[in-house]
Amino acid sequence: MNSGRTIFSQLMDFVPMNDFRQCVKCYNGNYKIKSFTCWDQYLCMAFAQLTYRESLRDIQACLRAAQTKLYHLGIRGKVSRNTLANANQVRDWRIYADFAQVLIAKARKLYMGESFGVELDQTVYALDATIIDLCLSLFPWAEFRKHKGAIKLHTLLDLKGSIPTVIIVTHGKVHEVNILDQLQIEAGAIYIMDRGYIDFTRLHAIHQAGAFFVIRAKDNFRFKRLYSLPVDKATGMQCDQVITTKNFYARKDYPEKLRRIRFFDKDNNKRLVFLTNNFTLPALTIAELYRCRWQIELFFKWIKQHLRIKAFYGTSENAVKTQIWIAISVYVLVAIVKKSLKIDSSLYTILQVLSVTLFEKTPIIHALTDSNGQDSGAVPSNQLTLFD
């Protein structure tokens, strides 16, 4: 006799079903579908993410072994490797991309008051990209090198809560700086970027949109100093200058004044030079903001380590993007659950608990807040963590 509800179904209670149906309807995802709907597809793929399944055959074997429990998981259609492979192949990946954006908007509201190390009223974003290597013979559409395939995840991360607000998936040849053309710049926000994003035409567009940028300067950057501002060298700050670009084309693309800050990092014995169009924040705050950019590197390493986005269940572009977007939506969904239930455990610990308790019929809050668990010792010393 089945009593209670599984943890998996309780987890899916946090999914806004009306929004999911709207995303499916927008792209006719269930057109002429009789049994295995988009919701069934999402549940199977979410199950695979949460339990670290290796392949479609692995997903099929695990779910069929628990056939009597599938109804209580919310899966109504028959789970078949071929059916799931076909769904990933033909159903528009934008269904799950749009749905992930719905969850991201919800998560950002929950994490709006989070601190990331620098207390500012403005929204602060970190922009970067990471490469996921692929076999070119299996993924011929993902061109990168002559004998190598890859895709890039271009990500705009809200540092409050480490929530990815924009993710653009491209093949490996697309340069990072081109993504600036696809972003909707938010007035008053601060965008932190590495020197690979230096393009003075695009930086000037950010400036004209009323936003700010903090970017690391290239070694060969030529400039003309107009005047210097006082700095406290005991903090590691070496200079704070107001400059203009000296190169003809750079000056043409960015005719405004810039602020150049040079900082010496004692911990790494490294000198860093930053460019920004923000003339009001203290120079040390600018340096601290750039230090916080490391959160996006941590985010990339974390999702590669804990989400199934390095080994794919299908080889088509649609299947790859579907898997990536469902993985991101699961990541954000668990972050929403953590905040909504006020769970102190790290996101890593929550995922580990969920991976072995999805079929259990116990209140999810009890499973995730068991006082007998030792959260502090659950993460190895070399394990990356978020939401500590």
Image: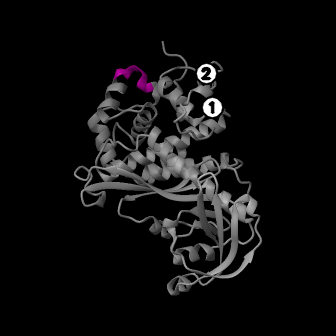
Would you place residue 339 above or below residue 22 in this image?
Answer: above
Type of the residue with mark 2? Gly
Quadrant containing the C terminus is top right
* Residue at 62%, 28% in the rendered image: 376
Most distant residue in the left direction: 137
70 part of magenta stretch: yes
Q: Is residue 144 left or right of residue 265?
A: left
Q: Depth check: 166 or 372 in front?
A: 372
Would you place residue 12 above or below residue 150 in this image?
Answer: above
Would you place residue 141 above or below residue 209 in this image?
Answer: above
The reply to whether residue 91 is in sight is no
Q: Depth check: 290 or 121 in front?
A: 290
Residue 370 sits in quarter: top right
Residue corresponding to mark 1:
345
Q: How is the image coloured?
A: one colour
Type of the residue with mark 1? Ser
* Residue at 29%, 60% in the rendered image: 145
Residue corresponding to mark 2:
373
User: Can you give x and y, in whole percent of width and height, for residue 317 in the image?
Assistant: 32, 53
* Residue at 68%, 63% in the rendered image: 286
Q: Mark 2: which secondary structure? A: loop
Label 1: how many Cα within 10 Å (few below 14, some 14–19, many 20+): some
Highlighted range, magenta:
65-71
Q: Is residue 36 left or right of residue 303?
A: left
Q: Are marks 2 and 1 in contact (CB under 8 Å)?
A: yes
